[in-house]
Structure formats: structure tokens, C-alpha cells
Amino acid sequence: MPAETLPPAPPRRRLRLSIGAGVVLALVVLSAAVGLGIMRGQASPAASLPLTDEGSSSEDSGDLYVHVLGAVERPGLYVLDLDARLVDAVAAAGGTTDDADLTAVNLARVLADGEQIVVPTMGAASDATGAAPPGDDRVDLNTADQAALETLPRIGPALAERIIAWREENGRFQSVDDLLAVPGIGEKLLAGIREGVRV
């Protein structure tokens, strides 16, 4: 007796299977697209830092971080190009206020990463660099001339000139340790003059 063959599946059932498979495939593709979009959104959050003077996001403008304070329109943290100068940081902060004392800052100075810039108001700079307190006969690194610097141990004319040149190029010494940035001054020499200088 010949084996019975099953009749082919009705066309309607085959159509239902095809539609179901298509729907499942579409759901898988849609889920993958949504997941990829979420991951991309998490990988590149919007920049939260202030905008630079060009109006572009600070995230796109470089990787030199500077903190601008004092007599500027918008004090804050800014990200500038690596070769930025102090004038660029002031511009990024919206420019100076009317009472800013620009004679106390060197606008042409090249900036360093992580630097804090304080633009003083009129009179504040002279207060900061005024006369030494009574009994303090230390040499002020920010106001001393060459002759005063040469009174320090092991500081001759050449080193005194370098200290003044560094000050003119980079602005005020923020601490006595800044002397290490002057060519020819190392830890040993600094230790020998540390007690005789101030900023």
C-alpha cells in the first residue's frame, strides 16, 4: 500500500508565517537602531563649559584649560587652543570690565594648561605690589630691579636679567617656586635664596 503524502500547507498559513517572520525581523532591526542611538548619545554628551569668543563650543576649541577671574565680563573655566595667549582667555571671558587694570597683566603672554588668570581692578594691582610690611626686607620678585636681584646669594647680572626677562614675558610671579621656570635656576639655588625673596 503506497505511503500517504501530506497535502501542502494552505496558502493562507504560509502567508501568515511570512508576515510573522517579517515583523520579527523588523522589530530586531528597530531595536538595534534604537540601542545604537542611545549608546552614541551617551558617548558624546553636550559640552557644559562656556562658549569661546567665536561662539563655538569650548569642547571643540582645544585642550588648554584656563580659569579666568577678576575684572572680566564672564569669569569661569574656558578651553582654548594650545597656542592661546592671555588676550585670548580675556576675550573668551567676554572682555574686561571698565575698571580693569590692563597695565598689571601681560596680554601677549602664552598660556599654560591649568592656569588661573586674575585680571585686577584699578588700584588692586598696586595694593598687591605695594611696600613690604614693616620689618620685611625680602626682595620682591615682581618689583625688584636688576641691582636689587643681584643682592641675593649666587644671583649675578646674567641671572638677574633672566628673572626680569621671565617676568616681562610671563607676567607676575605667583609664587617663589615660579623661579624654577627661569633658565639657570634649579632646586639648589632656589633653596639658597628662598628666605630672601617674596612675591
Image: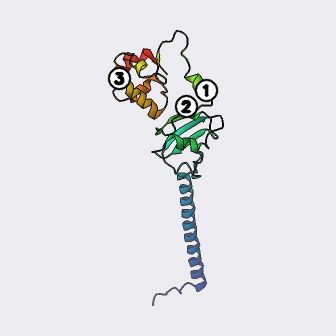
Label 1's element? helix
Q: Which amino acid does label 3 sit on?
A: Pro
The residue under the point 39% across, 17% down is 193
Label 2's element? helix
Q: What residue type is labelled 2?
A: Ala
> Which mark, by number, is residue 104?
2
User: Which circle's residue, 2 or 1, is located before the other in the chain?
Assistant: 2
User: Which circle's residue, 1 or 3, is located before the other in the chain?
Assistant: 1
Q: Alpha-carbon distance for marks 2 and 3?
A: 25 Å
The residue under the point 34% across, 18% down is 154
Q: In this view, does 80 lie above or below 105?
A: below
The image quarter containing residue 28 is bottom right
Q: How is the image coloured?
A: rainbow
Mark 2 or 3: in front is 3
Front residue of 70/38: it is 70
Locate residue 41, reporting x and y percent: 56, 55
Check whether the beta carbons of the residues at disc 1 and disc 3 lie within 8 A of each other: no
Local packing at callout 1 (Cα closer than 10 Å; few below 14, some 14-19, many 20+) is some
